Image (cartoon, coloured by chain):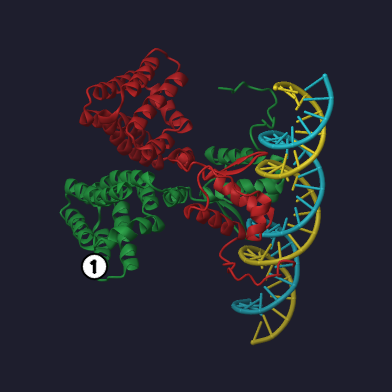
Chain colours: A green, B red, C cyan, D yellow
Amino acid sequence: MDQSEQSAPPAPAQKGTVTQRAIEEIKAMIREGLLEPGQRLPTERDLATQLGISRSSMREAIRALTVLGVLEARHGSGIYVTQLEAGDLLETFGVVADLSRGPRLVELLEVRRVLESTATGLAAARITQDQLADVEKHLAAMNATDDPEEILSHDLAFHRTIAFAAGNDTMAAILEGLSSRTFRARVWRGYQEEGAFERTRREHSRIHRALVARDPEAARAAAAAHVGEVEDWLRGQLEG
Amino acid sequence: MDQSEQSAPPAPAQKGTVTQRAIEEIKAMIREGLLEPGQRLPTERDLATQLGISRSSMREAIRALTVLGVLEARHGSGIYVTQLEAGDLLETFGVVADLSRGPRLVELLEVRRVLESTATGLAAARITQDQLADVEKHLAAMNATDDPEEILSHDLAFHRTIAFAAGNDTMAAILEGLSSRTFRARVWRGYQEEGAFERTRREHSRIHRALVARDPEAARAAAAAHVGEVEDWLRGQLEG
DNA sequence: CCGGCCGTAGTGGTCGGACCACATCTGTGA
DNA sequence: TCACAGATGTGGTCCGACCACTACGGCCGG
């Protein structure tokens, strides 16, 4: 709305802070293909000189892009562009889940329910024998122990494998964030104390059977019900 | 050489870089409720002293949390915790969409289709008269002009209003990121050149009719088809 | 000739201090 | 009483030095 074209091409375009400008500058370089995934960037000192800013400011810009999963700094070696894969970029999604509280937790679970059911449905049609074997491995391990930590660990792997088998890495990465350890640990702490172990096991078995039967609709329903259980419980917690 | 004064009983926990430690430290403070949304933090200088690091490192940590939407720095005033609302935290989602290319664009559209259809279905049941009026306003404005920029603008507002009416702010925020200006501009540039205007208008009308009729299933289907059209086109582009 | 050791140059990581730009409060003067 | 100007404190930027680590290459012993 304010983009009135100016004459000077090398004009600094005094928008916002210097660091912010540097961030946009680097993002633009990547977007336009000047920086390929995996490629090494010039040194911090050189980059700072190129953009005419101090190394401190450039470092802040680099740090910002690092936490976003766009860049990766290797001490003593250099700065590199990540592979820009779904996992790299969506890692920050976990932060959101970790810092969310109250009603937002329910909203996140609602999003997870929608995506998880879709992914599980897709997986029923696409999962390979090897992946199915993995799923069964985690299912068995989950049922073979009573250690909550271990159960949670295999539970996560169970769903992760299924999400990955759906073939949409982006969706799988988002689900990964929505199921991050600390997030689920917080919710499940109370949920499992109410003796939900058995119900969880039944639900997992139902999902597994649907995958074996290659029944997408059943898989979708089972996954939705599975997440929905936790969702309803949490909703009740917030009200009561 | 001057930092060896105290033996540090609270355990320095030498994990990763100093800055990384500071980031986790602040996140923990927020997670544990020591820092409330909207609250003002100590000054950069004080924070640096508290954690026993330099101001430079602390600034990098703050910058990192700023781009994640957790903190907000106001020049001359101080540093504040954001409201930690969905919009604040999920703003970075737009960055992902902007930097994605090729097959990942299709994956993102697939995620959007799933969420958009869900949100539109929910909206059919929950939208208020005022919100419906807004939707109609954008629909009319969209059909009254031929300026692609303006069309895109109202198109975004059309879907945003609907997503918001669904009642799940988190879902709406994610959709916002998946529909960010630059992302859609890139895809639609080619799509609309193929004379897809008319089809888009028909699809929007269909969504609108379903909302008016309070028919969730029809709304869901219409939204899925709408996004699916673009999805298919893009998939074809990548193959052909 | 080969291979491992070690020094060195180059990189990111950290530090401390200085100064600038901006927001806010305060006290003065009309 | 109110408006303005200064003082104060904050984040924003810059500089220069040093530390920690990696990678490379030449040296030395086998």
Between residue B102 and residue B33, name the one nearer to us. B33
Q: Look at 20% across and 62% down and name the residue there.
A: A198
Q: Amino acid at mark 1?
A: Asn
Lateral position of residue B2 relative to residue B142, left or right? right
Between residue A83 and residue B45, name the one nearer to us. B45
- For the question of whether residue A60 can be seen, the reply is yes
- For the question of whether residue B196 can be seen, the reply is no
Between residue B32 and residue A209, name the one nearer to us. B32
Task: Give x and y (percent) for residue B204.
Answer: 31, 22
Lateral position of residue D4 relative to residue B129, left or right? right
Lateral position of residue B231 relative to residue A217, left or right? right
The C terminus of chain B, quarter of image: top left
The N terminus of chain B, quarter of image: bottom right
Q: Look at 69% across and 56% down and name the residue there.
A: B54
In the depicted structure, whether residue B123 falls above or below residue A191: above
Task: Give x and y (percent) for residue A64.
Answer: 57, 47
Query: Mark 1 belongs to which subunit?
Result: A
Q: Look at 35% across and 43% down and name the residue there.
A: A107
In the depicted structure, whether residue C24 falls above or below residue B10: above
Q: Residues within 10 Å of mark 1 (few under 14, many from 20)?
A: some
Task: Give x and y (percent) for residue A195.
Answer: 24, 62
* Quadrant assignment, res B207: top left
Q: Look at 27% across and 71% down and name the residue there.
A: A145
In the depicted structure, whether residue B184 falls above or below residue B208: below
Label 1 sits on residue? A143
Element type at mark 1: helix
Between residue B217 and residue A195, name the one nearer to us. A195
Task: Give x and y (percent) for residue B47.
Answer: 64, 54
